[in-house]
Image (cartoon, rainbow, N blue to C red):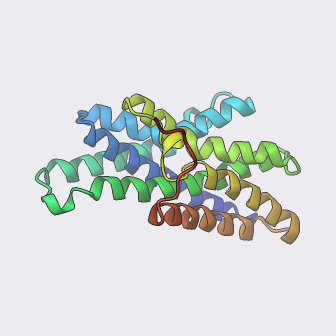
Amino acid sequence: MSVQLLLIFDFIGTVAFAISGAITGIHKKMDILGVNILAIVTACGGGLMRDIVMGNFPPQMFVNPFYVLVAAIVANIVFLIMYFHKSVPLKYSGVYDRGLFIFDTLGLAAFMVDGVMIGVNFGYEDDLFLLTFLGFLTGVGGGVLRDILSVQMPAIFVKHVYALPVIIGGIIMVWMHEIMHTWNTAMVCSFAFVIILRAMARHFRWNLPKVKF
């Protein structure tokens, strides 16, 4: 396994989810502190929940706050850009939704990989269920906390096949390793799979069945 490759996924996930959290905070008319908090929670919340499940205390975000700092820097950059460009033309009114989708998808895919690899590093390489769950929790946890703090229904329950690609991606990642005996290929392919499936779900308007009244 390439440690450098895993660090790249960590960084991609942190930046993507920090942007996602900052965009949501700005859309909800939060002040700069609220935007920072929401960005940090979105970027680091999934890892925090994963560490609690794994009994890794204190959680990594407190032991090594590098990614907390990255999330805060990204949040302030996004805030300043939006602060000095307040008037968005009407034809760009869909930018919020598209931006949130793009960065959410990147964060989901990157942190799914991260969650699975954390389980592997803890010695659970042969436990498919645990590895898939850790990938799922790390991927969706920050987004769920973001949505709860911004007082909206978590996207995991209602939107664009949000969680299913993460679950399937985690399973594919573990199976690919068992077949090919290399985590690097498994990480890249499962990362790409989550992005492609999410993009297809949005394009073709796929959603899981739900009861309509």
- Counting from the top left corner in percent of width and height, residue 51 is at 67, 34
What percent of the width, then of the height, locates residue 80? 21, 49
The vertical placement of 185 against 105, above or below, is below
Residue 155: x %, y % from top left: 48, 42
Residue 44 at least partly seen: no
User: Residue sitting at 64 percent across and 64 percent down?
Assistant: 5
Q: Quadrant of residue 26?
A: top left
Residue occupying the point 79% across, 58% down: 174
Q: Is residue 6 above or below residue 179?
A: above
- Residue 40 visible (yes or no): yes
Identify the residue at horizontal 38%, vertical 33% (top origin). Answer: 37
Q: Residue 110: which quarter of the image?
A: bottom right
170 with respect to 202 (left or right): right
Image position, residue 130 (x, y; %): 79, 42
Give whichever of 44, 132 is nearer the camera.
132
In which quadrant of the rendered image does the N terminus lie?
A: bottom right
Query: Is 101 placed left or right of 106 in the picture?
Result: left
- The residue nearer to you, when weighing 116 against 96, is 96
Report the residue at 57% width, 47% height from top. Answer: 209
Q: Nearer the viewer, residue 44 or 197?
A: 197
